[in-house]
Amino acid sequence: MFFDRIEAAPADPILGLTDSFKNDKNPLKINLGVGVYQNAQGQTPVLNCVKEAEKIILETENSKSYLPITGLSEFGVLARELIFGKDSELVNNGFAVSCHCPGGTGALRIGSDFIKQQNVATTVWISDPTWANHYQIVSMAGLKYERYPYYDRVTHGLAFDKMLETLQQAKEGDVVLLHACCHNPTGIDPTVEQWQELAEFLASKKLLPFIDFAYQGFGNGIEEDAQGIRIILEHCKEVLIASSFSKNLGLYNERVGCLTIVCDSKEVGDKVLSQMKIAVRTAISNPPAHGEKIVTTVLSDTKLRAMWEDELAQMRNRIHDMRKALASKLNAAGAGDFNFIVEQNGMFSFSGLTKEQVERLKNEFSIYIVGSGRICVAGINENNIDRLVSSIAAVIK
Ligand code: LMR
């Protein structure tokens, strides 16, 4: 027998919750687990700009033949414009090379495969806490990981000094995995001054930044959310960036992400691109086209681009309003001081709820949040917020 020794794996800490939620018969159930935007009606509709782009694609597409291994070159240019800014030399000077990967996860995995295959590094430093999938992506690629402290549970802020203190132990050439904005799960991002200090630190220690950029546009804006990466690039000549269009274009199941590797010259960029192609070819051969064409159409069409920016701002603002409402209603319910929630960025709120409280919310109230206490604020609306607040207050008291 080959398979009888295999042990059952635990359910995925995030996507496994969605499965449990679907099986829950309680009509009042609330899913605040997975990071998926829901509108005020609790739906996750296709963005209008995406619908418009799909109409264009449907009319103009005349072949389903393979895309190039790294995807359409226009897609790479547009992805780099979002990361570096339209006027950045890195968009077109060949120092930065990109490939379309299946989602941000695909970009993280292809990037990790590349690091392993090219003997770039052996150890990746990961924030504690972080997105639960980071650990296994890195490990499955054959890399080791270490943790650096990130969140101060007492102040509900960034444990910046402890983070740098721990990263002092990193060896020259190690990789440091960072979240560009809307840190998942804490929602706490470095300030501009902290990015500056971090960038200088990484450069002086000769550490390689690998930046997860899954939430561009969900923090303070498209340009604002790229600021940390741009500061890092002022100091570090080589950087990997895993960006995602799952959230900001709502293309979750189309799996559109992009791995961008910034090199110190075009000559190195060309070589890295050639090896990147091997990493993609061996993992997925070449990328799926539909989502990539949507992104390319929306970002390159002036009207659709404006529509997208508007729709993204609406999502960002609704989340922000819900964040404020959640904090003030929890405060009013006597559940404690939750003003810190308003300071957090992006889709999530790191609530401070314990594992036991999270379990009670699920078992007694059919409210699903991640075991770390991470609440997807994008799943809160006028219809469920009062029930959510009274349930949280009940498990806290
Ligand atoms: C999340 O953190 O909930 C999202 O990134 C979705 C996922 O794949 O985990």
Image: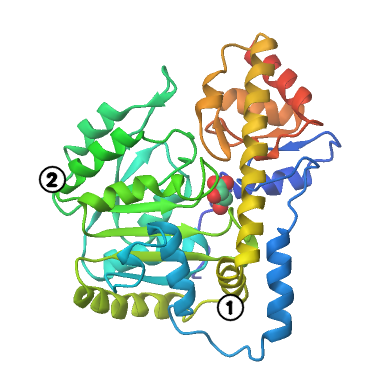
Kind of residue indicated by mark 1 = Ala
The disc, 2 or 1, on the residue closer to the chain's N-terminal end is: 2
> As rendered, which of 186 and 10 lies closer to the eye?
186
Horizontal side, residue 264 vs residue 381: left or right: left
Examine the image and state in which quarter residue 58 appears. Answer: bottom right
In this rendering, is residue 394 above or below 88?
A: above
The residue depicted at 73 percent of the width and 66 percent of the height is: 51
Q: In the rendering, which numbered label is found on residue 204?
A: 2
The residue depicted at 86 percent of the width and 37 percent of the height is: 27
Horizontal side, residue 61 vs residue 344: left or right: right
Q: Position of residue 247 (x, y in %)?
A: 59, 53
Kindly check if marks 2 and 1 are in contact, taking CB atoms under 8 A apart as contact: no
In this rendering, is residue 272 above or below 305?
A: below
In this rendering, is residue 299 above or below 85?
A: below
Residue 179: in sight, yes or no?
Answer: no
Q: Say few, some or many: other residues with alpha carbon within 10 Å of mark 1 (under 14 / 14 to 19 / 20 or more).
A: some
Kind of residue indicated by mark 2 = Ser
Residue 357: in sight, yes or no?
Answer: yes
Q: In the rendering, which numbered label is found on residue 2?
A: none
Q: Position of residue 138 (x, y in %)?
A: 36, 56
User: Looking at the figure, which quarter contains the C terminus?
Assistant: top right
CA distance separating discs 2 and 1: 41 Å
Residue indicated by mark 1: 289
Q: Position of residue 236 (x, y in %)?
A: 21, 53
The way the protein has been coloured in the rendering is rainbow
Q: Say few, some or many: other residues with alpha carbon within 10 Å of mark 2 (under 14 / 14 to 19 / 20 or more).
A: few
Q: Secondary structure at mark 2?
A: helix
> As rendered, which of 190 and 117 lies closer to the eye?
190
The residue depicted at 29 percent of the width and 33 percent of the height is: 193
